[in-house]
Image (cartoon, rainbow, N blue to C red):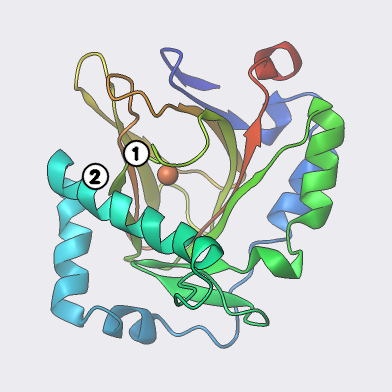
Amino acid sequence: MNQYKDLFYSFHYDEIQGFDEIEKVARALSEIPTDFDVAELQKKPGLDRYKRMRASLDILPDKKQALGLEAKAHLNKVLPSIKPEAEDTNHKPHEKWSFRPGHIAFNPALGRLNELKTLLNDYFDFQCLQAGDFLYPPGGFRLWHTNKFDLESWFIFFVDVDKPKGSFFKFIDPDTNELITHWDEPGTVNIFRISSNNSDLLWHCIGSEDCHRWSQGFSIPDNWKEKVL
Ligand SMILES: [Fe+2]
């Protein structure tokens, strides 16, 4: 187990008792859609902008600008539910996956994570909420963000990569402002807490250097340590 304070934990599956079936089901999700083309992903913002966005992970975030972008993205996400004619920027109903800046998101409506979610609910005896189902291609990324507009909770992310240390999860210690880079390994489980409190925000980003990185996230109960540790 790799632990940073009470902020971030990373486990190999075999370090968590009772996670055998969860590992099998989670890792079976590591697929590359046949209709996915990295060049298309890069073309979305334009190749230059794509490269600039990827390079922004190398430095500490411009917090004001990043929070502004995050607020705007959040508004786009909730707008369709309060204003039906607004364009749904999330997923079209039958689309298996859709583009996000630097990565793709699988459509939760198609039930790709149902089996994993059921196993997780049983394990924690808790209604875990799905938080994301992503694939980052080589050179892919998720920009610096905080998730402050999402659920305040502990989250578990099942992470898989097709090359050890080919991608990273970076975060900033809210107390010391220290930047921590965690390099991903195949078949790992990351657990961290998302706060919406401005003094406890967990700034984080994801970047792939030269591998495919899959992650499936869920909220988990505050007492998760009683089961996992
Ligand atoms: Fe996040």
Q: Is mark 1 within 8 Å of ligand 1?
A: yes
Say which residue appears at 62% left-offset and 81% top-offset: 95
| Residue 27 spot, x, y in % from top left | 70, 54
Q: Is residue 9 left or right of residue 166?
A: right
- Where residue 99 appears, x then y in whole percent? 44, 74
Pointer 1 residue: 146
Write down which quadrant ligand 1 falls in.
Answer: top left
Give the residue type that dot 1 points to. Thr
Q: Is residue 122 left or right of residue 213?
A: right
Which quadrant holds the C terminus? top right
Q: Residue at x 25, y 55 (%)?
A: 69
> Is there a contact, CB below 8 Å, between mark 1 and mark 2?
yes
Mark 1 secondary-structure assignment: loop
Q: Is residue 55 visible?
A: yes
- In the picture provided, is 116 more to the left or to the right than 221? right
Residue 138, image quadrant? bottom left
The answer to whether residue 164 is left or right of residue 73 is right
Amino acid type at image mark 2 = Leu
Question: Disc 2 designates what residue?
Answer: 67
Q: Quadrant of the N terminus?
A: top right
Name which residue lies at 53% across and 73% down: 84
Q: Nearer the viewer, residue 59 or 152?
A: 152
